[in-house]
Amino acid sequence: MRFTLVTATIVLMTALGPPLVSLYLARQQGLQIEMERVRGYAEVVVQRSDRAVEQMQEAIDLLIAEGAVDPCSADMLQLMRQLALRGEFMKAAGVVDGNFMPCSSLGLHEPPLNLGQPDTVTAIGTELRLSSPMPLPNDTPYISISRDGFIAMAHRNQAVDIATDIQGAVFATFNPNNGEIRTSIGEANPDWIDRLGDEQEATFVDGSFIVAVMLSDQVGQTGSLAAEPLFHLDERVREISLRWLPFSLLAAGVLTLAFLYAARQQVSMATQIRLGLRRDEFFLEYQPIVDLQTSEWVGAEALLRWRTRDGKLVEPDIFIPVAEESNLINLITSRVLELAAQDMGGFLRDNPVMSLSINLSASDILLPATSEHLLSVIKRFNLRPGQLTVELTERMLVEPEKARVALAAMREQGIRVSIDDFGTGYSSLSYLETMPFDSLKIDRLFVEAIDKEAATSRVVLHLIEMANTLQLDVVAEGVETEKQAAYLRERGVRYAQGWLYSKSIPADIFKATC
């Protein structure tokens, strides 16, 4: 009897032990992955907030340095427009007189705009307003910084407006001095901020949320938080358990080691990127570039996509910054070039009027292997000059002189160079004059403004005029309506891409449609 009882106990432990251990490890692994993901979002929020403050402070410094007798003069208004145009996050600059704004990058305001009382005034006299009015569509609230007679503004929700597929996600910025929530998407719990204590950052589970809170190490009065509902962890645990649980009944020891190995391998996004490259999880889709006069497809932009083993798509806005910071971006670019050659090399050879655009990072530009890879594709498929275009944003030109030499060498080999998202970064208009560009891409932000007849719609016309003056081709991104297309066509823009014509599509569909 006793032997039978012991035997039954051992059998029961053998049957139930491995599944329970596997479930525990699955939860620990899932929690670690989800906490790291939430922390990554909090870091994105604080970085976006820091960049916005930095841009606004720099703009005010430049306006103060001008020392104009008439701060609303034509020259000063032009300077304000230039500052607003080149700011990635800052959207307006102006003059402040007490609580009124007589003029700004949008022009003269008659009567002056009443900004209201500042919400905070620092020891050095800098005024912070969390909701400043602007004469723009939808009464979009702006956050502003003002001092010494000048003011700079950014969209109130710029830092927290992050595209994500996480249902119920919460993003917020706050004042570390009093815990006051400044901007938020979703309902942020002020008690989460108290969990920081004296630390710079904290990640924890609170009630039904996984939460990450951190302070900026650049702006002393800025903090950020991100949170996701705990049911996402349950989904993650369920996915992991269902994948491994059946095997635990047959090989408990092997399964436990596999879980520990998987946990170590999936600690960070960087590790997941490496695994994704190893497992061939990355692929390309192609968004057609059309001739605005004929609506015919004349080329495509290669867009990188990542579908993980569990079938989920990871947004480029999430994994590209991590790849750049962890020195994996060159491996990704190499994979992009390989995939583009496989997908489109023969098609480009057989269709010499077609072209293909590929996005490069800052380090790609300066890496000799990138040019060598591009040239090998050209020689392998006997492509004509101009069939390959490399695209880069102005924010990538961190070493302008080296970049200028590298880009010039590419052009000598028949590779076209395009500047993407011009007007949304930090650089000045001098880049258009000094860098060896062939074309300029108008960011969708400015194209969208055409339909809304917003003040920013005038930026499109300025960009077109600058490009024409410098003899650059113009490609408009994000064209979604016929009104936008007609506006661009009437002003001499030759090329466009956007959902009006097609979303990004697989290579076989693109080639079959052409």
Image: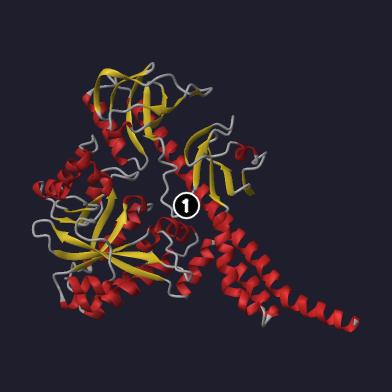
**From the viewer's perspective, is residue 325 above or below residue 344?**
above
Classed neighbour count for the residue bearing mark 1: other residues with Cα under 10 Å, few (<14), some (14–19), many (≥20): few
Nearer to us in this view, 401 or 163:
163
Q: Please identify the quadrant where the N terminus is shown.
A: bottom right
Return the residue at label 1: 167
Nearer to us in this view, 136 or 456:
136
**From the viewer's perspective, is residue 39 above or below residue 366?**
above
Nearer to us in this view, 469 or 117:
117
Q: Position of residue 204 (x, y in %)?
A: 63, 49
Judged left or right of residue 448, residue 131 is: right
Q: Would you say residue 36 is visible in this rendering?
A: no
**From the viewer's perspective, is residue 103 above or below residue 176?**
above
Q: Would you say residue 186 is visible in this rendering?
A: yes
Report the number of numbered marks: 1
When asked about the image quadrant of residue 258, the answer is bottom right
- Amino acid at pointer 1: Gln
Residue at the location (27% across, 67% down)? 505
Residue at the location (31% across, 28% down)? 134
Judged left or right of residue 14, residue 499 is: left
Look at the image and name its color scheme.
Answer: secondary structure
Judged left or right of residue 44, residue 28 is: right
Q: Where is residue 508 in the image (x, y as percent from the top left)?
A: 25, 75
Which structural element holds mark 1? Answer: loop
Q: Position of residue 61 (x, y in %)?
A: 39, 30
When asked about the image quadrant of residue 401, the answer is bottom left
When asked about the image quadrant of residue 236, the answer is bottom right
Residue at the location (24% across, 75% down)? 378
Q: Position of residue 308 (x, y in %)?
A: 46, 68
